[in-house]
Image (tube, rainbow, N blue to C red):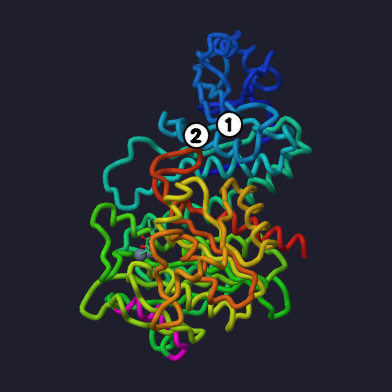
Amino acid sequence: MEIKVIAGNILESKSNVIMVSYFEEMKPLEGDISAVDKALDGAIWQLIEKGEIKGKACEVTVIYTLGKLPSMRVAVVGLGKKAEVTTDKVRNAVATACRLMQKKNADTVDTVTQGAGIAGIGIEDAAQAITEGALLGTYTFRKHITREPEYKEIKQLSIVEPDKSRIPAQERGCHKGRLIAEATNITRDMVNEPANFMTPTDMAEMAKKLAQTYALEVTIIDREQMKEMGMGGLLGVSQGSQQPPKFIVLKYRGKDSDELDIALVGKGITFDSGGISIKPSEKMDEMKGDMAGGASVMLALSAIAQLKPKLNVAAVVPTTENLPSGTALKPGDILTAMNGKTMEIISTDAEGRLILADALSYATRKLKAKAIVDAATLTGACRVALGDICTGAFTNNQELVDKVVAAGKEAGECIWQMPMNEEYKEQNKSDVADIKNVGGRGAGAITAALFLGEFVDSTPWVHLDIAGTGMAEKDRGYLVKGATGVPVRTFVNLVMSMAKQG
Ligand code: BES
Ligand code: ZN
Ligand code: ZN
């Protein structure tokens, strides 16, 4: 979809549909919607009076202009209460409207700058939210479908702006929105891709491609080097698979010094069968998405490279399949992670923490990162606790987690901090090794996080458990059924805000 800002008046728009916004209880109509209503001889107002249009967030009402305006249709987009409008409401509403209009075969859409100037939303931010909403909300994953689609993609969305002086800010917002939405949608593609098309080798190829396109430094560590480096967790989990494991490091350099301001670490299990502790077959297919964290850190880095903050940032992705076989890891086995700590395997299905043990050790000891944030589809327990709305956050540093939560809020990716009381550590104690990989039935997301915490020394660190939020069961606002791309936009906001704070 092409997105641009054009100077003009929405009343003269010849596009297939024009979008105007309506707030709950707006009486009388003001601004653009009032002008469009007049041109339609009060048709919108009638629908409001009859209670058909209420202005609830994400409500979309399509009205045919029947020749009263050059455009064929008007989509009245609800934004909720005027005082409560946020950029995320704009993003969600535009996404819902665009998805509906795409299904109704609209090829061109013109919109006003929805939300701009209301409740403190600037025009640049509004344009960014509109762009993100349109691109994220109309996302489809049709790569493996050979039959013709039922509808075509929207070709063009124009933000129509009567005041020319406002256009440069809107164009900046569109540009930023596009590159962030594209990074999110590529993450979604990688996560939706089945495991036979997204192997650890494919993940590494993707990293190389991103490195080439965005001038990033890339290192792919193979099995032999992993042995030399002592990456026992990743090697152990990969033992049962025919696919060679890869350890991916991408680096963005935004300043001259060699210090690494932040490492983004992502779990890259391209398929999690559970291994010898095999999962039930129902919904096992969903485990093709167990590399969502890994994909998200890679694509976040590609967006960061385009935004060019003055910081050094790395993405670290340990990637492998988790499969049962005659050579697979077994319950009771003991592995040694890169930092020398030994780990007793209680369940081979708690594999994420084993590969992250090496990746976090690498980010801490080898890269000497000043801060680490990891993202992982780590525990079913986190999904039970927080559902698919909030990502769980766990930390050893309140200041860093506050920044991460704020970055998520700005992105509309809700993050909820979970406790990390020392007392839970008791559950991870092993009789035969330094730590065991399952901490019993209670507090599964917390004991998993405490396990990871053993591998970051005293580096400020936040762990994001995206087991619930990495995938959506149905369309909701700009989320489309399947992979969500969470937390790409949080990472981008976090790094940009860190760069601003200096
Ligand atoms: N990848 C799963 C967690 C998961 C579950 C992600 C559902 C997305 C949706 C992880 O590797 C896993 O299997 N965790 C186990 C840990 C348990 C054995 C301690 C779990 O949550 O059941
Ligand atoms: Zn597992
Ligand atoms: Zn897993």
Q: Is residue 194 visible?
A: yes
What is the span of residues highlighted in magenta in the rendered image? 228-239
Q: x, y (%) of residue 298? A: 52, 65
Q: x, y (%) of residue 343? A: 42, 79
Query: In the rendered structure, which amino acid carries the disc numbered 2?
Result: Thr
The residue at the point 46 percent across, 35 percent down is 99
Crowd rating for badge 1 (residues with CA inside 10 Å; few <14, some 14–19, many 20+):
many
Marks 1, 2: nearer the viewer = 2
Q: Which residue is mark 2?
A: 96
Report whether 358 appears left or right of 76.
left
Q: x, y (%) of residue 306? A: 63, 61
The rendered magenta stretch, by its main secondary structure, is classed as helix
Assign a secondary structure to mark 1: strand
Query: In the rendered structure, which amino acid carries the disc numbered 1?
Result: Asp
Report whether 495 appears left or right of 193.
right
**Quadrant in the rendering for residue 334:** bottom left
Q: Which residue is mark 1?
A: 110
Ligand 2 located in image quadrant? bottom left
Q: Is residue 302 visible?
A: no
Residue farthest bottom in this picture: 228
Report whether 353 appears left or right of 175.
left
The residue at the point 64 percent across, 21 percent down is 11
Report whether 386 appears left or right of 270.
right
Crowd rating for badge 2 (residues with CA inside 10 Å; few <14, some 14–19, many 20+):
many
